[in-house]
Amino acid sequence: MPADSYCIDTNVVMDLGRVYPRDVFPGVWESIETLVVEGRAVIPREVLDELERHDPDAYEWAKGLDDFVVEPDDHEIAIVAEIAENHPDWVQGRKNAADPFVVANASGHGRIVVTHERRRGPGVLDHNLGIPNVADEYDLECISLQELARREQWQFKR
């Protein structure tokens, strides 16, 4: 069975520094970097753009990892256009700007979405959607960083 691959949302990368600082949790960082080296974890360029605006340290780390940042291909751009048509108010200016690209990348490449966003209840307005709501429309699985660690069987011991 082939190993899973992952498309990582902005909030997960930002939480690395906030929740899992590298000086305390180096194994978490090294494990993610290993996934990147193996070609099993990516972020869309739009996630990098959000990191540049909101978290300079996370931006520098992500930018420095070879093959972590990916450009959207034509198929992904078509998915983003479809998402925009179906949910015209989801992206508002820069708010949620990377989210459709996370969904499109995962859908276009058979990846699992890693996000800390939660599914919102039925009837939620577009501007309040979470990635899991839209990911459901593409039969994508969304997991947290903790679930990623469990699936990859990461264990950090002293």
Image: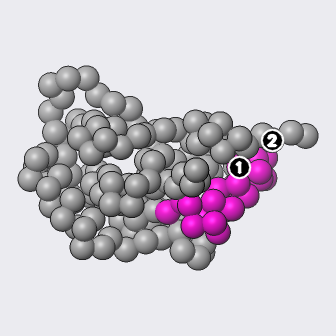
Asked whether disc 2 touches disc 1, contact meaning CB atoms under 8 Å apart, the reply is yes
Q: Nearer the viewer, residue 88 or 51?
A: 88
Quadrant in the picture for residue 41: bottom right
For this view, does 34 lie left or right of residue 83?
A: right
Q: Secondary structure at mark 1?
A: helix
Q: Nearer the viewer, residue 13 or 57?
A: 13
Residue placed furthest toward the right: 158
For this view, does 108 lie left or right of residue 151?
A: left
Quadrant in the picture for residue 50: bottom left
- Residue at 64% across / 69% down in the picture? 37
- Residue at 23% across / 41% down in the picture? 137
* Residue 142 visible in the current orientation: yes
Q: Nearer the viewer, residue 144 or 5?
A: 5
For this view, does 138 lie left or right of residue 151?
A: left
Residue 112 vs 38, above or below: the answer is: above
- Residue at 39% across / 69% down in the picture? 45
**What number is the disc on residue 28?**
1
The residue range painted magenta reads 22-42
Q: Amino acid at mark 1?
A: Val
Q: Amino acid at mark 2?
A: Phe
Of the residues under marks 2 and 1, which one precedes in the sequence? 1
For this view, does 131 lie left or right of residue 128?
A: right
Residue 145 lies within the magenta run: no
Residue 31 vs 141, above or below: the answer is: below
**What number is the disc on residue 156?**
2
* Residue 58 visible in the current orientation: no
